[in-house]
Image (cartoon, rainbow, N blue to C red):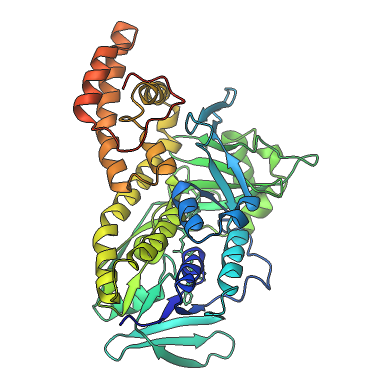
């Protein structure tokens, strides 16, 4: 019989959602979180304040019955507003159907809401200020330290789900014992967050867009918050000509922004002050294997597969992990089998989104400026209208189609990329789209999706 008690390490985004999903199934859930209770304290500033929530995350939140509570803290974002130097901003919609939007969510507000939802279940025991400091798999113990008193104690390990983020202590402890291999592939670019406060009681920029200032080797982005501010992020190399290391003095910072983002400077009144006081944080991809130790421990979310943030999918993938555990509970009565099945089925998709997230960095900071990119984006939307049951742009598959797995989105995306290149080249020569060739390539190479056709498109499919 399956153990009716479950430990979760980490009450971040995934841990808190998973606690609710497990509680709804009647499990007794012990959640250990090293931070203090966020319901009682102000959020930390200067660290990843807002996140893009898309359909995979929404589907998981719906599964937990939480979307109604979450909607009021979201801002709908319809596309990218690209700010090139010396040109007017250009808007590139994310999709072409009314519902194809992503949502900007405040991390602190969302985390608090998920913790409140978990706490509303009598069978969830939330323990804040408790840091996991070790795992003794051989003796089935999970070790903690009380952050205030420094007192150490341990707890029965099996079954434990580690949702303790990219720097997972659980993963680290298992790696030390040789039970897991882990590797973090660091990007040579770091990030720093800055604030664009409201201007005359309104947003400083259009709040229906994610704003991007692509500059080739680096970029600046801004996402709206419900309080009329924007959280902006500078992604820049650690070392080199254009780098954080090169921005030594307040004057360096001011000139760098005036030279590269002149339209942004008047919108950040505390530019130098925030730049100097906000942390410069690292970005990377976590590779870990295996993700589980028999039925004792499973890594989930960033603890298993942290990725760079350029597809806005880390949290969405972590929420999808939680929903998948919930789904597997219908199929398995044994944690060892469930953990093994989770890892086997989920690993290829985690690898696929980690790869797409890295590719998206190049797209956001560089390719988005290439005229061929804009042409092929427009062509992809055209093909989607012509063949809605076969051709869906890769970005849309990832963001708006949770029924298409990450692995499938990556695979079809590659085929679609080849079709787009062929048709774009032909159109550059002939001056028009070769519809017969488009139909041949799409029908031959892209099998139809099982989903119903969208009646909002005129279709030749
Ligand atoms: C700059 C940036 C922008 C991002 N933007 C997006 C986005 O737009 N969309 C998106 O989907 N994703 C985004 N992400 C990724 C997203 O933040 C993560 O994928 C997501 O937070 C993963 O959730 P998690 O619950 O696995 O980990 P976390 O949210 O990191 O939660 C881990 C929890 O474990 C706790 N913990 C850590 N160590 C211990 C310990 N030893 N003992 C007990 N508790 C512990 C932590 O305090 C924390 O509460 C972004 C990330 C970054 C860095």
Could you tell me residue 244's position as x and y percent?
51, 50
Could you tell me residue 270's position as x and y percent?
71, 49
Q: Quadrant of residue 166?
A: bottom left
The answer to whether residue 79 is above or below residue 176 is above
Question: Left of 411 or right of it: where is 458?
Answer: right
Q: Residue furthest left?
A: 444
Question: Left of 229 or right of it: where is 325?
Answer: left
Q: Quadrant of residue 113?
A: bottom right
> Residue visible at 33% across and 77% down?
297
Q: Which is more toward the observer, 232 or 123?
A: 123
Could you tell me residue 339's position as x and y percent?
29, 70
Q: Residue furthest top?
A: 430
Would residue 263 be seen by someone viewing this image from the given angle?
yes
Question: Left of 73 or right of it: where is 415?
Answer: left
Would residue 301 be seen by someone viewing this image from the given angle?
no
Q: Which is more toward the observer, 68 or 133?
A: 68
Could you tell me residue 155's position as x and y percent?
42, 89
The quadrant in which the N terminus is found is bottom left
The answer to whether residue 459 is above or below residue 195 is above
Give the number of callouts: 0
> Residue visible at 42% across and 30% down?
454
> Residue visible at 35% across and 80% down?
159
The quadrant in which the C terminus is found is top left
Q: Which is more toward the observer, 40 or 183?
A: 40
Q: Quadrant of residue 221?
A: top right
């Amino acid at each position: 019989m399956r153990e009716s008690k479950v430990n979760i390490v980490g009450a971040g985004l995934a841990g808190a959602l998973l606690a609710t999903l497990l509680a709804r199934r009647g499990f007794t859930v012990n959640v250990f979180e090293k931070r203090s209770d966020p319901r009682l304290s102000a959020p930390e500033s200067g660290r990843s304040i807002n996140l893009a929530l898309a359909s995979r995350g929404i589907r998981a939140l719906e599964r937990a019955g939480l979307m109604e509570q979450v909607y009021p803290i979201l801002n709908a974002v319809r596309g990218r507003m690209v700010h090139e130097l010396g040109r007017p901003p250009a808007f590139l919609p994310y999709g072409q159907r009314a519902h194809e939007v992503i949502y900007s969510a405040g991390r602190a507000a969302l985390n608090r809401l998920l913790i409140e939802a978990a706490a509303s279940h009598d069978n969830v025991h939330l323990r804040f200020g408790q840091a996991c400091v070790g795992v003794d798999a051989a003796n089935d113990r999970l070790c903690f330290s009380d952050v205030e008193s420094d007192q150490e104690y341990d707890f029965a390990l099996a079954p434990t789900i580690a949702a303790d983020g990219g720097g997972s202590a659980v993963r680290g402890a298992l790696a030390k014992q040789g039970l897991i291999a882990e590797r973090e592939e660091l990007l040579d670019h770091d990030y720093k967050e800055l604030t664009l406060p409201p201007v005359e009681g309104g947003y400083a920029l259009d709040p229906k867009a994610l704003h991007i200032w692509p500059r080739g080797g680096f970029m600046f982005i801004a996402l709206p918050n419900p309080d009329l501010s924007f959280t902006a992020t500078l992604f820049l190399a650690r070392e080199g000509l254009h780098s954080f290391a090169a921005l030594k003095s307040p004057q360096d910072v001011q000139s760098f922004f005036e030279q590269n983002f002149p339209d942004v400077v008047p919108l950040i009144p505390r530019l130098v002050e925030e730049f100097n006081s906000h942390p410069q944080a690292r970005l990377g991809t976590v590779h870990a294997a295996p993700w589980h130790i028999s039925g004792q421990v499973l890594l989930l979310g960033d603890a298993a597969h942290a990725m760079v943030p350029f597809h806005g999918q880390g949290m969405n993938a972590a929420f999808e992990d939680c929903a998948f555990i919930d789904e597997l509970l219908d199929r398995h009565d044994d944690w060892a089998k469930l953990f093994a099945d989770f890892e086997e089925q989920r690993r290829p998709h985690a690898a696929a989104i980690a790869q797409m997230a890295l590719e998206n960095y190049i797209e956001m900071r560089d390719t988005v400026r290439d005229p061929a990119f804009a042409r092929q984006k427009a062509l992809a939307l055209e093909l989607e209208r012509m063949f809605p049951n076969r051709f869906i742009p890769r970005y849309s598959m990832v963001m708006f189609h949770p029924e298409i797995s990450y692995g499938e989105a990556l695979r079809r995306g590659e085929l679609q990329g080849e079709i787009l290149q062929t048709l774009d080249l032909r159109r550059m020569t002939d001056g028009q789209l070769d519809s017969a060739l488009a139909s041949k390539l799409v029908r031959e190479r892209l099998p139809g999706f099982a989903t119903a056709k969208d009646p909002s498109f005129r279709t030749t499919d």
